[in-house]
């Protein structure tokens, strides 16, 4: 039975997990840095890197001992090698290299986005390629066609903010603290989604890309005007986000051709309103819908270990011990750069 140790440290979650080829998560541990970053209203890269360095090794020891396994029982050590905050990625990758070297096990350098892209298959054994993936997190907002392990075609990305970032920044404007996505969703429950007129950036455009910076600025103006209740702004923002996602995903599905399912992944997939809207869209297209359970949607190491298992299953060669961490690492290297400022991988 294949067994892989996964390591994740690309943002503000330090995580380790042991996953086997039967999709069993033998053990996993996550240390969140929310408290460290909360005073700054966002992730501070230097603080994140230091926290990863302090916490990672004890977490790895913890999962190994919980699963009663040693490094020798593992078939590979898989670590996020990018994209992400480079200091944190380096902590995880260098630790993985050291463990791989000491135990004479193969190293697998995993693209964090590939972890998100394949995580639905860890949760759902029935999910077959090809599927459309809407990946919405704090750092990414992309629409991909997933044809197989290592086979990703990107149809859309954001030309400015990721959706989670827009949730977090809007929440900050509304004084909701960090990370604001879940708090904004809670506040929106009490508001009127039609109360505040907000823009739907790029809706109607022929290319399925995303843009959320203008929406966030409109939230700021609405808040500063003093004319609206915060709960109405929250609900209206969330509705605008849903409208953008639906319109953009529809266009992408047309461009992609037939797929088996529409898959929602990334931290924002935790949002119930977004989840049910995307599920409805899949129903309209008569395709399956799946979203991994919450703990596999937000950043975690089980998805990194699972990506390692998927790569081993197609015979991927181990990565060399001098492989570099990559702050930018597009899943689809052939994707055309998008017009507009601040292009994100
Ligand atoms: O995937 P993730 O854990 O980290 C990244 O790779 O970025 O996603 C975290 C993001 C944050 O921006 C957070 O505010 C957002 O996901 N998020 C939500 C909700 N839960 C988490 N956004 C909207 N509604 C939620 N319920
Ligand atoms: Zn992520």
Image (cartoon, rainbow, N blue to C red):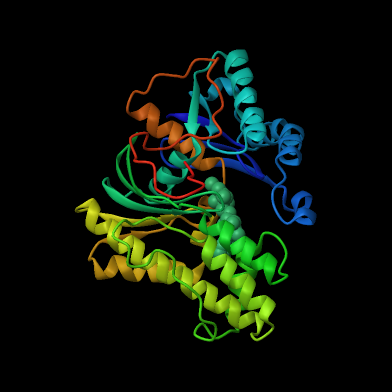
Left of 204 or right of it: where is 90? right
Image height check: is 139 above or below 293?
above
For the point 25% across and 70% down, which residue is it? Answer: 284
| Quadrant position of residue 171 | bottom right
Along the line of sight, which residue is nearer the eye, 340 or 314?
340
Quadrant position of ligand 1: bottom right
In the image, residue 122 lies at what x, y percent? Answer: 42, 45
In the image, residue 160 lies at what x, y percent? Answer: 51, 53
Image height check: is 269 above or below 59?
below
Left of 136 or right of it: where is 38? right
- Number of marks drawn: 0
Image height check: is 285 above or below 12?
below
In the image, residue 3 lies at what x, y percent? Answer: 48, 30
Q: Which residue lies furthest to the left in this view?
A: 258
Residue 25 visible in rendering: no
| Quadrant position of residue 70 | top right
For the point 55% across and 13% down, which residue is it? Answer: 104
Image height check: is 27 above or below 93?
below
Residue 255 visible in rendering: yes
For the point 60% across and 26% down, which residue is it? Answer: 93
In the image, residue 269 lies at what x, y percent? Answer: 49, 60
Left of 303 or right of it: where is 30? right
Which quadrant would the N terminus be assigned to in this image?
top left
Along the line of sight, which residue is nearer the eye, 32 or 2?
32
């Amino acid at each position: 039975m294949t067994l892989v140790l996964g390591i994740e440290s690309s943002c503000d979650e330090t995580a380790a997990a042991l996953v086997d080829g039967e999709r069993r998560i033998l053990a996993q541990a996550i240390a969140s840095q929310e408290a460290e970053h909360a005073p700054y209203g966002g992730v501070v890269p230097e603080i994140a890197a230091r926290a990863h360095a302090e916490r990672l090794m004890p977490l790895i020891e913890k999962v190994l001992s919980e699963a009663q396994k040693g490094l020798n029982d593992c078939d590979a050590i898989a670590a996020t090698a990018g994209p992400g905050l480079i200091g944190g990625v380096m902590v995880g990758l260098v630790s993985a290299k050291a463990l791989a070297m000491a135990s004479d096990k193969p190293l697998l350098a995993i693209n964090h986005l590939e972890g998100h892209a394949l995580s639905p298959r860890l949760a759902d054994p029935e999910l077959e390629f090809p599927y459309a993936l809407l990946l919405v997190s704090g750092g990414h907002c992309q629409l991909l066609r997933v044809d197989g392990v290592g086979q990703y075609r990107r149809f859309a990305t954001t030309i400015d903010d990721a959706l989670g970032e827009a949730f977090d920044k809007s929440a900050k404007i509304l004084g909701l603290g960090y990370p604001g996505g879940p708090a904004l969703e809670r506040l929106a429950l009490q508001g009127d989604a039609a109360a505040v007129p907000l823009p739907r950036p790029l809706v109607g455009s022929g290319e399925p890309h995303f843009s959320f910076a203008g929406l966030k600025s409109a939230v700021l103006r609405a808040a500063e005007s003093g004319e609206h209740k915060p709960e109405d702004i929250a609900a209206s923002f969330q509705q605008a986000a849903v409208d953008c996602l639906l319109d953009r995903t529809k266009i992408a599905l047309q461009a992609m051709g037939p797929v088996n399912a529409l898959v929602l992944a990334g931290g924002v997939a935790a949002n119930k309103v977004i989840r049910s809207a995307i599920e409805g869209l899949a129903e309209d297209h008569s395709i399956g819908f799946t979203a991994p359970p919450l703990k596999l949607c937000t950043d975690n190491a089980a998805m990194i270990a699972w990506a390692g298992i998927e790569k081993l299953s197609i015979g991927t060669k181990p990565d060399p011990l001098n492989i570099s961490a990559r702050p930018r690492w597009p899943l689809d290297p052939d994707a055309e750069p998008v017009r507009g400022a601040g292009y994100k991988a």
